[in-house]
Image (cartoon, rainbow, N blue to C red):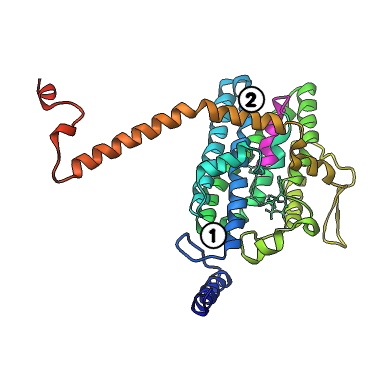
Amino acid sequence: MTTADTALRDERQDEFDALIAADQRIEPRDWMPEAYRRTLIRQISQHAHSEIIGMQPEGSWITRAPSLKRKAILMAKVQDEAGHGLYLYSAAQTLGITRDEMTAQLIDGRAKYSSIFTYPTPTWADMGAIGWLVDGAAICNQVPLCRASYGPYGRAMVRICKEESFHQRQGFEILLTLMRGTDAQREMAQDAVDRWYWPSLQMFGPPDEASPNSAQSMAWKIKRFSNDELRQRFIGMLVPQAEVLGVRLPDPELRWDDAAGRWHTGEIDWDAFAEVLAGRGPLNAERLRHRREAHEDGAWVREAAAAYAAKKRAEQTATTTPEHDPASDPLPREAVAS
Ligand code: FAQ
């Protein structure tokens, strides 16, 4: 690198730092440090993959929902998750990675996706617990991301959060209906809460002291709060809601610690979390196999869409070319006239 190159780079770095310090947005056209770009690609693509893999646990209940109304709601919710994945893939593409590269990383098993989606959904109450706990944790984590320093990510998150908050309410309402039902329905709701509570706390990521990316991501204002801060906020949100529902949060040690000014909780099983991240969670293999098969089954759709787009482009070029050669028309003029 020449001295002039170094000076230009320093100047750009200063501009970038000033934008971050002033809480301004970084846009795709702006210069950004390579590490910032890589961090965003990592986080946004993992987030997109999570939304897409996250369609599976609930998708399996669409045909088994207990009423037409529940089926319509669930179908709309799962479709929303697909939309979230697409906004996020688009945001990541503005950073110079292609959709094909991200898809390959996911189906080859190289990319991470949220630990929460490796757990099974054996009962209808799981739809309630996912909405209440998983979407609830997602909102807690994602509302601050609406202010992420990278423009396309923050803007995508605004719409996503509006939809997630509806999802959370529909999950709460499923659980409330079950809790007002028969003993068997109440037991089913409690059982689902028992199984989803701890994994939902893990969604926020490892404890702060074991989170290698947090400090830099917070300095860049991608993340606005640490993993533990958000986990605490989530617990504070759940406690009164659990009371309204009449469900028990399955942590006998859970209590507000006035002196420490935080929730005291039992030990989170970080070994189980590490197993899931290593691809050895209950349904990791199943989730990836399903995604891979869906990708292969969809090959003809992608080919047809690409062929159609190529045809439209060719038609457009033909009509905008000043010296248009009639011989290149798809149908001879006489055939059209007759
Ligand atoms: N699962 O240093 P940190 C949803 C990884 S969307 C798997 O703390 P960071 C909607 C992390 O990637 C749910 N891996 O990392 C929905 C890193 O690995 P790497 C997804 C995890 O990035 C609802 C390593 O551990 N939400 O639920 C997890 O600063 C219902 C060290 O961690 C988002 O993606 C985990 N739980 O903080 C859909 C939100 N936690 O890459 C369907 C955006 C950590 O260095 C149905 N993402 N890891 O190899 C974030 O806010 C952050 O990326 C964190 C992790 C907080 C997830």
Residue drawn where x is 57% and y is 24% of the image: 71
Q: Please say if 85 is above or below 207.
A: above
| Residue 84 place in picture, x, y as percent | 54, 42
Q: How far apart are the alpha carbons under marks 2 and 1?
A: 35 Å
Residue 258 belongs to magenta span: no
- The correct choice, above or below, for 88 with respect to 211 in the image is above
| Marks 2 and 1, the one that precedes in the sequence | 2
Magenta highlight on residue 127: yes
Residue at the limit of the structure toward the right, as seen here:
253
Residue 135 in the image: state x and y as whole percent. Answer: 65, 41
Say which of 90 and 292 sits in front: 292
Q: Is residue 90 above or below residue 56?
A: below
Visible residue check, residue 175: no
**Nearest the camera: 309 or 248?**
309
Which residue corresponds to mark 1?
150
Main SS, magenta residues: helix
Residue 138 pos. (x, y %): 65, 46
Type of amino acid at the residue the image marks with label 2 = Ser
Nearest the eye: 69 or 38: 38
Q: Decide if residue 128 is on the left or right side of residue 329.
A: right
Which contiguous range is marked in magenta?
Answer: 121-135
The amino acid sitting under disc 1 is: Tyr
User: Element under label 1?
Assistant: loop
Residue drawn at x 64%, y 59% is 223
Q: As drawn, is 3 to the left or to the right of 177?
A: left
Q: Number of labelled discs?
A: 2
Q: Which residue is mark 2?
A: 60
- Residue 219 seen in the figure: yes
